[in-house]
Image: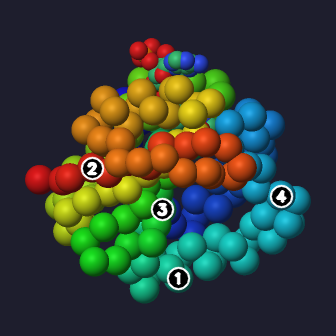
Amino acid sequence: MPHLELVRADHADALLAFELENREYFAASIPDRGDDYFAEFAARHAQLLQWQVEGTDFFHVLVTDTGRIAGRVNLVEVADGSAELGYRIAQNHAGQGLATAAVAEIRKLAATTYGLTTLRAKATLDNPASHKVLERNGFVATGERVLNGKPAVTYLCELG
Ligand SMILES: CC(C)(COP(=O)(O)OP(=O)(O)OC[C@H]1O[C@@H](n2cnc3c(N)ncnc32)[C@H](O)[C@@H]1OP(=O)(O)O)[C@@H](O)C(=O)NCCC(=O)NCCS
């Protein structure tokens, strides 16, 4: 089964390939990262590593048994025992339960390794797969808001 690894410098090439291969697929559900993201990937990767050192964000890759990156699971805006959860799974691994399993794993890491007590998340209403992933992992809807111009639901998960 794929497992989560904290993002390292040597993940950069595989991560860029993952983002390029799935760019169109992701853009159907969430905003495209934009051309600058790809053009400045190396500098951005270095910035992610720096934020990890500072403890404000923890980025993870979901690595298959063959060493390929199948997804990303991130904890961002870490503060006061809480973080915002984000994730994306490669198109060629969709519908295999990977997001559900990866969010279950990050829940454990959040409580143990990172000492967090709550996770926040949000998903637009037109992304039913993401709602399913969150609700299966104990996230409870807390409200509604507009996200990227679309109606969305906010979620909270109490860890422990
Ligand atoms: C959302 C996403 C992470 C789900 O990843 P995944 O690994 O395919 O998810 P899982 O296989 O764990 O579970 C998805 C569930 O949603 C269901 N699902 C998928 N599309 C659906 C749809 N259109 N309507 C209803 N359910 C749907 C799947 O059938 C599955 O449920 P099942 O196991 O009962 O069959 C993935 O589609 C993705 O990366 N999308 C682009 C980025 C994104 O949207 N990130 C989340 C932002 S909030």
| Label 1 neighbour load within 10 Å: few <14, some 14-19, many 20+ | few
| Label 3 neighbour load within 10 Å: few <14, some 14-19, many 20+ | many
Furthest residue toward bottom: 54
Mark earlier in primary sequence (4, 3): 4
Residue found 57% across the figure and 34% down from its top: 125
Residue 115, how many percent across, how many down? 20, 68
Can you tell which mark lies on residue 157? 2
Mark earlier in primary sequence (1, 4): 4
Q: Choose mark 4 or mark 3, whichever is in front.
A: 4
| Label 4 neighbour load within 10 Å: few <14, some 14-19, many 20+ | few
Residue 85, how many percent across, how many down? 43, 54
Q: CA distance from mark 4 to mark 3?
A: 20 Å
Kind of residue at badge 1: Gln
Q: CA distance from mark 2 to mark 4?
A: 30 Å
Q: CA distance from mark 3 to mark 1?
A: 11 Å
Mark earlier in primary sequence (2, 1): 1
Residue at image mark 3: 59
Q: Secondary structure at mark 4?
A: loop
Residue at image mark 4: 34
Kind of residue at badge 3: Phe
Q: CA distance from mark 2 to mark 1?
A: 27 Å
Residue found 11% across the figure and 53% down from its top: 160
Mark earlier in primary sequence (3, 1): 1
Q: Choose mark 2 or mark 4, whichever is in front.
A: 2
Residue at image mark 1: 50
